[in-house]
Image (cartoon, rainbow, N blue to C red):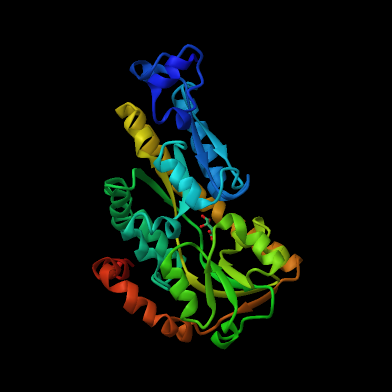
Amino acid sequence: MDRRSVLKLGGGAAALGLASAGFGGLAQAADAKMVLKAADVHPEGYPTVAAVESMGKKLAAATKGRLSIAMYASMQLGGEKETIEQTQTSALAFCRTSAGTLGPVIDDLNVFSLPFVFRSTEHMRKVIDGEIGKDLLASVTNSPNANLVGLAFMDAGARSMYDTKKPIKTIADMKGLKMRVMGNPIFVAMMNALGADGVPMGYDQVFSALQTGVIDGAENNTPSYVYDHHYEAAKFYTFTEHLILPEMLVMSKIVWNKMAKPDQQLIAKLAREAQFEERKLWDEKEADALKKMKEAKIDITYIKDKTPWQDAEKPVWEKYGSKYKALVERIQKVS
Ligand code: GTR
């Protein structure tokens, strides 16, 4: 592609990875070969990565290779905040991210970041698969400043505490622990409500922060804990399951708007399929992660009665929950 063509393409060209030689600008975009760039913080083989790669293969098959997806896994392009920003500016076409990291960009999503908002992962699945999920994807797309299109939700199980120091058996054991959380004020408050010290930090820094003692622990689901290596540094895992936080697949609105309607429809359909494909992979990966934790002799604690943990989070609900009251009521009604 010559320099003039590149200039003509403007924003979005990078994410589209317009690969075909001789592509002469947007007027011909409908038949141009596009490699859509996607990013994920997790490594190859992780359910979210595999589901988006599979979506890319289906996209390539359906368009005879005209559209495809190039996955940049393992934080090659930075942490989640960075990849969201790259998607907003169209340096990336897709970003798979946690709803928790997107909350500061699209406020409605913060409803999922309220501790213990779901009764179980089954409850969460029904919510993201149904009308509420649809409405929240629309909130992403309709958010005037986000510049993103909400395509799909994905499973991420339940998040629990882990640390390098000692088994966490009761809330009292949380006292004074420096615990990493995602960059969202709700999570800092959530940790502080338990007596710990919530430290917001990008996911790309967590492993080394655990190793060097910059933090004492973090919280995450078991596949992230195992496959992103945190379990090599933090040997104590406690099933508090305080957050059941779905993942999201979002697209750059700049890139989306450059696509023909049938391509948009195809992408939306395949993203919805990826939501269910990831779920199957998720269940397998969770079982595998637990097996690996046992093999590695991780000190595992189960919390039988979560009521004290839920009660401790009441101040967080009081501070952050009231504006999501209507949405929370809808969520609670889903059975
Ligand atoms: C993982 C999630 C990532 C990221 C990470 C984190 O479970 O899949 O998207 O949010 O947690 O804690 O930052």
Q: Is residue 274 visible?
A: no
Q: How many marks?
A: 0
Horizontal side of 4 relative to 226 (left or right) equals: left
- In depth, the one of 183 and 286 nearer the eye is 183
Q: Is residue 256 visible?
A: yes
Horizontal side of 263 relative to 19 (left or right) equals: left
Q: Residue at x 35, y 38 (%)?
A: 253
Q: Residue at x 68, y 58 (%)?
A: 229
Horizontal side of 206 relative to 258 (left or right) equals: right
Image location (x, y in percent) of residue 145 = 30, 47
Q: Quadrant of residue 224?
A: bottom right
Q: Which residue occupies the extreme left position in the image?
A: 326
- In depth, the one of 215 and 228 nearer the eye is 215
| Quarter of the rendering occupied by the C terminus | bottom left
Image location (x, y in percent) of residue 230 = 66, 62
Q: Quadrant of residue 297?
A: bottom right
| 238 w.r.t. 63: above or below | below
| 220 w.r.t. 236: above or below | above
Q: Residue at x 56, y 65 (%)?
A: 220
Image location (x, y in percent) of residue 261 = 30, 29
Image location (x, y in percent) of residue 267 = 39, 35
| 324 w.r.t. 87: above or below | below
